[in-house]
Image (cartoon, helix red, strand yellow):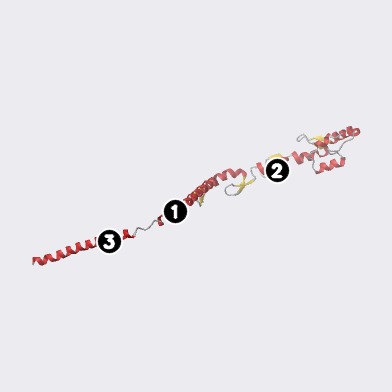
């Protein structure tokens, strides 16, 4: 037969384990002879008691130590709140209002109780976005950077798409054939005739004005 008391000895400290070793309490995998089981039960009931808080079977000699080391109320050294010792570490790491945390925006360490007020002010500070040259609130910086990067990537893609078109258009302009030589010669001839005609008219007018005074005399 097996001792059912052994299954309840789950959270023993070093001193309790030593007590079990001295008194020979069997582990969960050790059988008790049927002839001795009644004696063993009597021994367990005489030396063990059930903890009223956690339900574990504790050696009576160490019941007070078990209570003081596991369940006795203790005060948090940071906020002075009283609680069971077995939840003290969780309280200090996750729930204590005086535990030190860091601001999401400036990474400044401060008590958790002051974090919300600090971040309300700190998150409204602005920084210059070097992509769009606009000042952005720190609490909005993450979303702004994401959208700003998408806009910049889109603009860069459009620019890369228009450059080949511009090069093609420039090449098309350069590829246009020059005007024929006959067309150039005709334009030059007409220009020369026009200049000559204007010179003749101006010369005749000047000569006419010059001869008018001599006719009067």
Count of residue discs: 3
Mark found first going from the N terminus, 2 or 1 = 2
In the displayed structure image, the side of residue 106 where residue 202 appears, left or right: left
Q: Which quadrant: the C terminus?
A: bottom left
Read off the residue under disc 1.
168
In the displayed structure image, the side of residue 190 where residue 154 appears, left or right: right
Q: CA distance from mark 2 to mark 1?
A: 72 Å
Nearer-the-camera pick, 141 or 62: 141
Q: CA distance from mark 3 to mark 2?
A: 105 Å
Nearer-the-camera pick, 200 or 11: 200
In the displayed structure image, the side of residue 9 where residue 95 appears, left or right: left
Which residue is drawn at the image coordinates 85% and 36% (left, top)? 47
Q: Position of residue 216 (x, y in %)?
A: 8, 65
Q: Position of residue 61 (x, y in %)?
A: 83, 39
Q: Is residue 36 visible?
A: yes
Q: Which quadrant: the N terminus?
A: top right
Which residue is drawn at the image coordinates 10% and 67% (left, top)? 214
Nearer-the-camera pick, 175 or 101: 175
Q: Position of residue 32 (x, y in %)?
A: 88, 35
Q: Secondary structure at mark 1?
A: helix
Which quadrant of the structure image shows residue 192? Answer: bottom left
Q: Secondary structure at mark 3?
A: helix
Which quadrant of the structure image shows residue 177? Answer: bottom left
Q: Position of residue 197 (x, y in %)?
A: 22, 61
Read off the residue under disc 3.
189
Residue 89 has which mark?
A: 2
Q: Nearer the viewer, mark 2 or mark 1?
A: 1
């Amino acid at each position: 037969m097996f001792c059912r008391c052994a299954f309840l000895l789950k959270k023993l400290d070093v001193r309790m384990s030593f007590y079990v070793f001295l008194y020979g309490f069997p582990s969960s995998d050790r059988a008790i002879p049927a002839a001795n089981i009644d004696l063993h039960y009597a021994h367990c009931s005489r030396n063990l008691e059930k903890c009223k808080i956690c339900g574990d079977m504790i050696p009576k000699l160490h019941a007070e130590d078990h209570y003081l080391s596991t369940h006795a109320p203790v005060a948090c050294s940071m906020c002075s709140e009283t609680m069971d010792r077995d939840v003290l570490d969780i309280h200090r790491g996750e729930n204590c209002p005086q535990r030190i945390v860091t601001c999401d925006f400036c990474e400044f360490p401060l008590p958790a109780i002051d974090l919300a007020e600090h971040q309300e002010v700190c998150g409204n500070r602005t920084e210059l976005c070097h992509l769009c040259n606009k000042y952005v609130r720190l609490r909005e910086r993450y979303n702004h950077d994401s959208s700003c990067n998408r806009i910049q990537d889109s603009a860069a893609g459009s620019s890369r798409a228009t450059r080949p078109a511009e090069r093609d258009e420039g090449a098309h302009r350069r590829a246009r054939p020059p005007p024929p030589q006959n067309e150039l010669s005709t334009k030059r001839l007409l220009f020369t005739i026009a200049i000559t005609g204007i010179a003749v008219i101006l010369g005749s007018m000047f000569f006419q004005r010059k001869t008018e005074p001599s006719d009067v005399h």
